[in-house]
Amino acid sequence: MREHKDLSPRRRRRRFPDEDPAYTRRGRLTEAQRARLAELREEAFAQPEIPGGGDRLSTWESGVRGPDPHPYWLVTELAAVDTELGILKSGKEADVHLLRRALPDGSRECLLAAKRYRSAEHRQFHRDAGYLEGRRLRRSRENRAIARRSAFGLNLIAEQWAAAEFTALCRLWTLGVPVPYPVQRDGTELLLEFLGDERGEAAPRLAGLRPDPRALDDLWWQAGRILDLLAGEGIAHGDLSPYNVLVHEGRLVLIDLPQVVDVFGNPAGPEFLARDVRTLATWFVSRGLDLHIPTVIDRLRRRAGLR
């Protein structure tokens, strides 16, 4: 009688030992090998752990930095980490976030305002045509993209606005005009001095104040000095209003300067200067200050050399 081979479970286990991690058959992986492969994949896609539990490592090493000397409060160590603390302001073209930059051991930290221009599909540069006069690019392809407002063109506009604002802030800071210290620019993200308290509460806008007569006189004196400094440099804020001026510890500080205008290089420069003065001065008049706005405008036009 013909004998049959023993195909008992014990024999099959010896012949096909799947529990042996070294065993494969025609590319089939064992359970142990599959588990190891999954671990390798997870390690490959895992984000590096940020010291101190922050959201990112400090970007101080990249981008363009603000003017020297850097303020004493600014954390410049490359070991620092950035932690997002929430949004301060949402605008049509950009959002401003509150950021804490600190060393992992907690020995030093500072609060920063991170102004980030939105992606092309959400950006609304609805008033940029007049401001962009005098900022033309050398390449005709880029100028055409800007004129058509294509996605590429909108990204170029955002880059222009971010660069223009950072350059203006650096220039004004150096001249002694009260603006937030420009920490750095990386692409379309600006990191600026946070104007507020240690708890992260931002300084109020001028528009929200109801100062008494004495405080009103002092604030207008500060405003007049700022307008005089700007006119003397031949520039206008371009969109100056009580909503673009903060009052930090009793001091007026200009913010939102992406549309800063050269009053000589821009054909509408003189009108931008006059509009800035008219808008800001009207707020003071509405609060009871006795001003003759045309006289103020005429004086600042002469200061700028327009007459």
Image (spheres, rainbow, N blue to C red):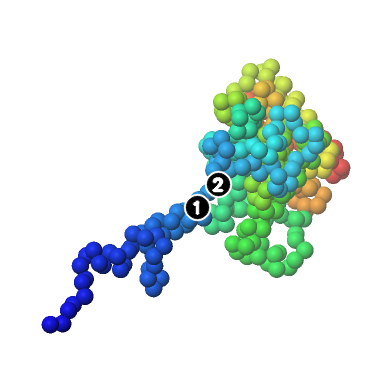
User: Mark 1 Cα within 10 Å, few/some/many (few <14, many 20+)?
Assistant: few
Residue farthest toward the bottom in the current orientation of the protein: 1
Would you say the residues marked 2 and 1 are in contact, meaning their CB atoms lie under 8 Å apart?
no
Quarter of the image for residue 171 reads top right
Q: Residue 7: give x, y in percent of width and height.
A: 21, 71
Q: Is residue 87 left or right of residue 260?
A: left
Q: Which residue was labeled with disc 2? A: 48
| Residue 263 appears anywhere in the view | yes
> Of callouts 2 and 1, which one flags the residue occurring earlier in the amino acid sequence?
1
Q: Is residue 101 left or right of residue 235?
A: left
Q: Amino acid at mark 1?
A: Glu
Q: Nearer the viewer, residue 15 or 93?
A: 15
For the residues labelled 2 and 1, the Cα–Cα distance comes to 9 Å
The quadrant the N terminus occupies is bottom left
Q: Amino acid at mark 2?
A: Pro
Residue 261 drawn above or below residue 103: below
